[in-house]
Amino acid sequence: MRILVINGPNLNLLGRRQPEVYGTTTLAQIEERLAQRARELDVEVACFQTNHEGEMVDLIQREGERAQGIIINPGAFTHYSYAVRDALESVGRPVVEVHLSNIHAREGFRRRSVVAPIALGQVSGLGWRGYLVALEALVGILREEGA
Ligand code: DQA
């Protein structure tokens, strides 16, 4: 089983970007922890990061087809990118949306996610652990469905 993991704009700066909000763990460390948990679960994770909306759409189209499920932190695209939302919907794979911070407890514009209505679920506010929660849930759900 292959799970696609996509991180959006500015998440390449994790570790030094507003550590009081996003923590001190780097994206490379998160991806390593995901890969380790994936090995334990006997699944494969394919991790990507992009700062560009069009590239995120390309990634979802290209890599989404090769995966059984998608974990995505779309960064600020979460709040306004209908293109990312449509790409996720088009590829037809179960999506878990992840946010390091609790987007419901921050500025008003962050409370709305245009991705959430087409997602299986959302993990928000658990820091880097949210990615592991998303992986475990997604793999469990896919296995139950017989994927
Ligand atoms: C984020 C929350 C978004 O509002 C923000 O634009 C990000 C990161 C999070 O992981 O908490 O870039 O998705």
Image: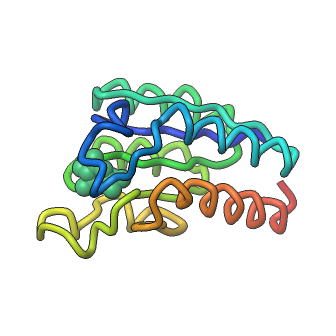
Render colour scheme: rainbow
Residue at the extreme left of the image, as rendered: 108
Task: Residue at 63% x, 56% y: name it.
Answer: 132
Side (left or right) of 109 relative to 24:
left
Q: Could you tell me which quadrant the N terminus lies in?
A: top right
Residue 97 x %, y %: 46, 58
Q: Is residue 99 visible?
A: yes
Task: Residue at 75% x, 48% y: name it.
Answer: 37
Task: Residue at 40% x, 46% y: name it.
Answer: 24
For the residue pair 53 and 32, the one nearer the viewer reads as 32
Q: Is residue 77 visible?
A: no
Residue 123 x %, y %: 48, 66
Residue 61 x %, y %: 50, 31
Q: Could you tell me which quadrant the C terminus lies in?
A: bottom right
Task: Residue at 47% x, 66% y: name it.
Answer: 126
Side (left or right) of 107 relative to 145:
left
For the residue pair 121 and 87, the one nearer the viewer reads as 121
Q: Is residue 51 above or below residue 103?
A: above
Side (left or right) of 124 relative to 2:
left
Q: How many numbered callouts?
A: 0
For the residue pair 20 and 142, the one nearer the viewer reads as 20
Q: Is residue 131 above or below residue 44?
A: below
Residue 34 x %, y %: 66, 44
For the residue pair 9 and 82, the one nearer the viewer reads as 9
